[in-house]
Image (cartoon, grey):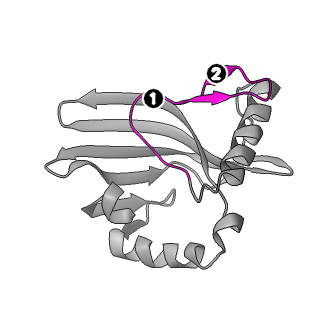
Amino acid sequence: MVAAIDSPDWVGVAPSGEKTTRDEAEKQLLGLLSIPAGQRPIPLQKIIYVNVSGKQTLVVYWVYRNTPEGNVGSIVRDTWQQTQAGWLRSLHEKVFPDRPLKLPWCHDFYRELIAFREAALSCGSQGHRFTLGQPESIKSPGGQARAG
């Protein structure tokens, strides 16, 4: 899966400035894969900003998870490069360590996120797909489609 998203020269940058190579990141992901698929944490994402400039795209987004205490996560900035193999992520920068978030969204949106997560789990989803472009519509508990 990493090869489908990240370029061979991918670099991750932690809030401390510490850099991680793609090989190191793949080793860290092995621990996550040891968790049974239905029990793995599912990260949620909310795109804040996208800038496409030629063959490069910058994406800034919230990445977080729901916990009983509320949302916990960070802001991330990714740089994507258009290659012969398609769009590949070359740089992943985490702005600050995971922490409780006070997101500027209403309670209804939070409830929709929970409903979306539960629906994804009930359909056998094993992860969250990140795509460039318009967010897909999700159905609210009342059945109305709303932009995600």
Which quarter of the rendering shows the C terminus? top right
* In-image side of 4 versus 15 (left or right): left
- Whether the magenta-drawn stretch holds residue 141 is answered as yes
Find the residue positioned furthest to the left: 84
Q: Main secondary structure of the magenta part?
A: loop
Q: Residue at x 74, y 24 (%)?
A: 143
Q: In the rendered image of this protein, does residue 44 appear above or below residue 125? A: above
Q: Nearer the viewer, residue 79 or 147?
A: 147
Q: Which residues are magenta?
A: 128-148
Q: Nearer the viewer, residue 145 or 22?
A: 145
For image coordinates 32% across by 58% down, the residue present is 4
Residue type highlighted by circle 1: Tyr
Q: Residues within 10 Å of mark 1 (few under 14, many from 20)?
A: few
Where residue 124 appears, as percent x and y from the top left, is 64, 57
Query: Quadrant location of residue 34?
Result: bottom right
Please tell me whether residue 113 belongs to the stretch shown in magenta: no
Q: Quadrant of residue 132?
A: top left
The residue identified by callout 1 is 49
- State the image quarter where residue 18 is shown: bottom left
N-term-proximal mark, 2 vs 1:
1
Where does residue 83 sit, x and y in percent of width and height? 17, 48
In the image, taking residue 36 as reference, residue 10 lies left or right, namely left
**Residue 132 higher or lower than 27, as above or below:** above
Q: Callout 1: helix, strand or loop?
A: strand
According to the picture, the residue beneath numbered tag 2 turns out to be: 146
Could you say where residue 100 lies in the image, as x and y percent from the top left? Answer: 75, 47
